[in-house]
Image (tube, coloured by chain):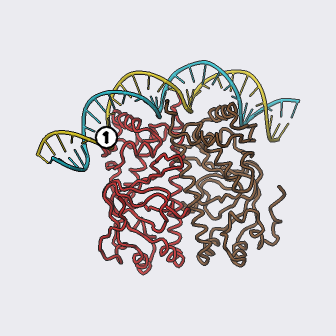
Chain colours: A brown, B red, C cyan, D yellow
Amino acid sequence: MSNPGKEVGESTVSQCLSCYLKALCLPPDLSPDQAGALGRIVDTPVRLEKRESLIEQKAVFRHLFVVRTGSLKQLTTDARSEMLVTALYLPGDMIGFDAIGPGYYPGTIIALETSSLCRLPFQYLDELSSRLPILRHHLQRNISKTMQEERVRLHQLLSRTAEARLAYFLLGIADSFRRRGFSARHFRLALSRADIGSYLGLTHETVGRTLAAYQAQQLLYVSGRDYHLLDIVGLERLASSTGRRQKRA
Amino acid sequence: MSNPGKEVGESTVSQCLSCYLKALCLPPDLSPDQAGALGRIVDTPVRLEKRESLIEQKAVFRHLFVVRTGSLKQLTTDARSEMLVTALYLPGDMIGFDAIGPGYYPGTIIALETSSLCRLPFQYLDELSSRLPILRHHLQRNISKTMQEERVRLHQLLSRTAEARLAYFLLGIADSFRRRGFSARHFRLALSRADIGSYLGLTHETVGRTLAAYQAQQLLYVSGRDYHLLDIVGLERLASSTGRRQKRA
DNA sequence: CGCGTATTTGACCCATATCAATGACTGTGG
DNA sequence: CCACAGTCATTGATATGGGTCAAATACGCG
C-alpha cells in the first residue's frame, strides 16, 4: 500500500474527495461544494509509530479522528487501576465518538503499528453540521450505529464460551476488513494474545489454547499475528453456538 | 399486545417545564422560550401496563421516548433466535438512541410494570436542534454518554465473576435511582432473576445463589424484587475485586 | 547477537453451568 | 373467595470450562 497521506501543507481541499476511504467518512449524497467545505476543516494528517499514543486518557475532547492506515487500541484504566483493552480501531474507523458525551477521551489510544489518521476539529464539524442536515444525520447515525454495534457485540460475548467469543471476535474483524475492501480470509491483526484476552475478558493462555484448538480442527491457520480463516462457515457455527455450554444430547 | 397509541389528554405545552425529570431531559441553560418550543413537539404521554410492548424489534425509528414512571426492558433476538435482555430503562432514561443509526429499533421494548413515557418525534427534535446549538449538544452528549457508559459497563462485566458482576450491576441500579432523587439503598427492581441473568450473562440459578450469598454476608436483604442494600462499601469492594478469580495469597 | 517480551504447553482445581426437584407467588376462572 | 395452573425462585448434586500457577520456547527489537 503506497502512501495515502497527502503532503502536509499541500491542498487539503480535495483530500477527502480523493481518499480511498471516503465512502466510509462522507455522506454519500453530499454535493462537491459541501464536501469541499468538509474537506477544508480537516487538519493535516497525523502519523504515529508503533507504541506511540494518539490520545491520553482524560484529555479534553476536541477532535475526532479517522484511521487511514494502520490500527490502534484503546486502553481504559478504571478506578481500581485495572487496565482493559476497550476498543480496536481499524482503517476507516472513527475515533472519539465516546468522548463527545463526557467531554474528554475515556481511554488512552495507542498505535499498534505505524498508522496515519485524519484529524477533524469537532467544533468546526459541529458548526458545519448545523447548516448541513445531511452531514448532521450522517454523523448522528454513525455515532449511534458504531456504539450500538459495539453494545450488541458485548452483550453477545457475555454469555458465550471462550471458543465462541473468539470465533465471534475474529469474524467481526474479518467482516471489518471485508467492508473496507481487504481480504476477509487473510489478515494481520496487530494485537497480542494478551490484548485480545483483555478485550474479550479471557486470559492470554485461553486465547492461545483456543486458537490452537481451531487450528487442530482446520478452522484457521495462525502464525504469530497473521490469520488465515480456512472454514468461515465452521467458525460461524462455533460463534453462534447458543448459550454457554453445549447442552448434552 | 402493543398499544403505543393509548393517550392521556393533557395540556402538553408546559409539561416539560413542570416535569420532575426536566433536569434529566432538558439542557440546563435553555431559555423559557426555547424550552417552550421543545415542549410543543412532545406528543401526549404513552401509558403501558405490565407486559405491554412499547416497540417491536425492527420497527421503523420515528420517536425517542423518555421514561416518566415505571420501568422497561429491551429484548434483542439475534440471528440464532436466542433472546437476550439488552437494556433496562428506569425513570429519566431515554429510549431509542440505539435506533438512530440503524433506522429501526434494535429490540422489542416491554414494560416491566405500569409505566408512562413521553414521546418525542425525532424529526421535529432534529429540526429544532439544528436551530438550537444548546439542544443539539445536549442531545449529542446524551447519546454519546449513554452509550459510552453502557460500553464501559459491559467491558467491566466481561472479566468479572458472577459475584462481582451482580454487585456491579446492583450498584449501577442504585446509582441510577440516587441520581433521580430516589433512595439508593432501597428499591424495587421489576426484573426477574432470569432477566437479570440474561442481562449479565449468567443463569438464573447463579443469580439467585449469589443474592443468597450476599444476604448471608449481610451485604443486602432481598425479598422477591425488593432490594435493601445494607453494606454499600462491602458491595463496592466485591464489585471491584479485580480479575475473574480472587488471586490466592 | 542477546535480552526482554510474547507465546505455548501442562497440571490443577474452582466457579459456575447444567440437570433436577420442590416450594412460593401470581393471576385467572369458577 | 378459593382452587388450580403457570411462572418464578430456591436449593442440591454433578460436571466441566477456563482461570491460575509454572516453566520452557520462540520471537522481535535494539
Label 1: state its secondary structure: strand
| Number of numbered labels in the structure image | 1
Quadrant where the image shows the N terminus of chain A: bottom right
Q: Nearer the viewer, residue A20 or A101?
A: A20
**Residue A35 position in % (x across, y down):** 70, 74
Residue D27 in which image quadrant: top right
- Kindly identify the residue that appears in the image at 73 percent across and 37 percent down: A221
Q: Which residue is mark 1?
A: B221
**Residue C21 position in % (x across, y down):** 32, 27
Q: Is residue B246 above or below residue A198?
A: above
- Give the letter of the chain under mark 1: B
**Residue B65 position in % (x across, y down):** 42, 65
Residue D9 in which image quadrant: top left
How crowded is the residue under tag 1: few (<14 C-alpha within 10 Å), some, or many (20+)?
A: some
Q: Is residue A64 above or below residue B86?
A: below
Q: Is residue A207 left or right of residue B128?
A: right
**Residue A166 position in % (x across, y down):** 62, 40
Q: Nearer the viewer, residue A69 or D15?
A: D15
Q: Nearer the viewer, residue A160 or C16?
A: A160
Q: Which amino acid, by three-letter code, is at mark 1?
A: Tyr
Q: Is residue A70 above or below residue B193?
A: below
Q: Residue lying furthest bottom in this view?
A: B33
Residue A162 in which image quadrant: top right
